[in-house]
Image: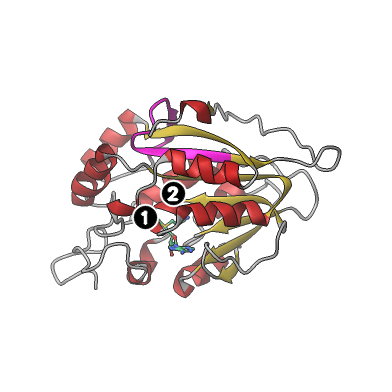
Amino acid sequence: MIGGPETGPRHPARPVRRNDLGQYVQLAAEWWRPDGAFAALTWLAEARARLVPPATRPGAVLVDLGCGGGLLAPWLAGKGYRHVGVDPVGTSLVIAAAHGVTPVRGDATRVPLPDGCCDVVVAGELLEHVTDPARVVAEAARLLRPGGLLVGDTVNATALARLALVRIGERIPGLVPPGIHDPDLFVPPRLVVDAGVRHGLRMAVRGLRPAVPSFLRFLLTGRGPVPMLPSAGTALTYQFRGRRVPVPGTDDRPDPPPGVSTVDHSVVRR
Ligand SMILES: C[S@@+](CC[C@H](N)C(=O)[O-])C[C@H]1O[C@@H](n2cnc3c(N)ncnc32)[C@H](O)[C@@H]1O
């Protein structure tokens, strides 16, 4: 259980078990609260959405694995996708649906949707919450049409990430809800890249870091937003992108141009 008489939802007491899905039920009211427990997810969603190009065909579908409360929805506005959200937590899906997401209850390692059903798969802050992240990447590749795009972000399996996001981050009110992460599930970029390549995706990775002045202001005042910016280092958090290799002459769309300065996976660390 989370919380206690002396703790507010911005800084709930540590739950008994890390990475417990029940936390998302307990914190349901926080999803859309400005500067609430999930504020950092909003910053990450904005950066993630920048990797999603406008749809190139009518009826394009974007499947958002581990969609939570649907925080990605406003950042996709005008891009032309039907936004389908997959999550095992019913309360989160109800909230996501209220923000225009088509809800599908399910597990990202066994998504109840057909092969090749979508143009874009998003896996934002999901891989570090599952025991088999490579399986999620495989599912994403299965769901994509030829030429389709996987985008996402996750936490690296480094000592720095453990220190910053667990030991320190959980002590900063409003930054990381205590117990939300199990650091043993943090994911090395090499695992994501290798899984994507094995399943026919052309992969790229780049680091992500908070804008320093905004982050300092957040630490002092508890107020966001904090823009998340590309960084050369991937030791903390990183974004990934995988294009399902198109079938020549069928759906051979170019990669999206908008500010996606990806680092080739040959330089991925760890
Ligand atoms: C940190 S939240 C991220 C939510 C959302 N992607 C965002 O960035 O706002 C992790 C989400 O993953 C979901 N999740 C955990 N395990 C999952 C699984 N096996 N399949 C699908 N979603 C899962 C949780 O319910 C939660 O909504």
Q: Amino acid at mark 2?
A: Thr
To which residue does mark 1 refer?
A: 38
Disc 2 crowd, CA 10 A, few/some/many (<14, 14-19, 20+)? many
Q: Is mark 1 within 8 Å of ligand 1?
A: yes
Distance from disc 2 to disc 1, alpha carbons, whole Å, reads: 7 Å
What range of the chain is rendered magenta?
226-241
Numbered disc 2: secondary structure: helix
Location of the N terminus (image quadrant) = bottom left
Q: Tell me which corner region of the image, top left, top right, bottom left or bottom right, holds residue 270.
A: top left
Q: In the drawing, does residue 102 fall left or right of residue 214?
A: right
- The residue closer to the viewer here, 104 or 266, is 266
Q: Is residue 188 above or below residue 89?
A: above
Q: Which residue is mark 2?
A: 42
Is label 2 in contact with label 1 (beta carbons under 8 Å)?
A: yes
As drawn, is 227 to the left or to the right of 212? right
Disc 2 Cβ-to-ligand 1 distance below 8 Å: yes
| Closest to the observer, 77 or 54 | 54
Residue placed at 39% from the left, 57% from the top?
129
Mark count: 2
Outermost residue on the left side: it is 6
Does the rendering let one see residue 264?
A: no
Image coords of residue 81 (percent x, y): 69, 52
Q: Which mark is residue 55?
A: none
